[in-house]
Amino acid sequence: MSRLTIYEDTNPGVSVFCSEDAGAVAAELTKIGVDFARWESPVHLAADAPAEEILAAYRPYLDALMGATGAGSADVIKMTPDNPAAPALREKFLKEHTHSEDEIRFFVQGSGHFVIHENGRVYDAFCEQGDLLRVPANAKHWFDAGAAPLFTALRVFTDTSGWVAQFTGDDISTRFPVA
């Protein structure tokens, strides 16, 4: 089940909020400009479906989402524990960074933690299949799917060059490891 846990950025050991209620999660994230929604998708795909099949199956939803957000492209990111690039990608995604555009993700399968660092707080949004998250441009954040990642997500971009990060140099993600 999706979950939001909030911490003061000076105290990683004690949460100040924790909920699995989608409405409560959305309400808390809205306070920092992040959109969260659960999609009940009629699309059912095999776990090993290729990216092209996933994009084609979700095209009607992507077209509506991209039209509403002004985005221009979408892709699929798929991570499995046996992917030889998984450790290097995890290391890159774990570094706090920002983007010059909104970061929009829809979890097709699996799960991961989007962690947002705003206003002196750390917001750990554990997202699962069916979760849609939009993190606004310039919001400090990182992503972690753990040492054995298992997820498939649609990524939506305004800039057609895709995922481009500006790293902050802050090591805060090392103080807030996810379970």
Image (spheres, helix red, strand yellow):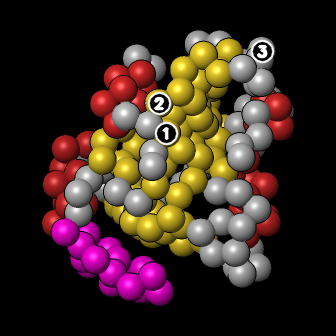
Of residue 124 and residue 85, the one placed in the foreground of this image is 124
Rounded to the nearest whole Å, what is the CA distance between mark 2 and mark 1?
6 Å
- 119 sits left or right of 75 in the view: right
Q: Secondary structure at mark 3?
A: loop
Earlier-in-chain disc, 3 versus 2: 3
Nearest to viewer (mark 3 / mark 2): 2
Under mark 2, the amino acid is Ser
Q: Which mark is residue 19?
A: 2
x, y (%) of residue 64? 16, 54
Q: Secondary structure at mark 1?
A: strand
Above-or-below relation of 58 to 117: below
Earlier-in-chain disc, 1 versus 3: 1
The crowding category of the residue bearing disc 3, from other C-alpha atoms within 10 Å (few below 14, some 14 to 19, many at least 20), is few
The crowding category of the residue bearing disc 2, from other C-alpha atoms within 10 Å (few below 14, some 14 to 19, many at least 20), is some
Earlier-in-chain disc, 2 versus 1: 1
x, y (%) of residue 141? 61, 35
Q: Which mark is residue 10?
A: 3
Under mark 3, the amino acid is Thr
User: Is the Cβ of the residue at disc 2 closer than 8 Å to that at disc 1?
Assistant: yes
x, y (%) of residue 58? 25, 69
Q: Which mark is residue 3?
A: 1
Extent of the magenta region:
42-58
Q: Residue at x 77, y 40 (%)?
A: 177
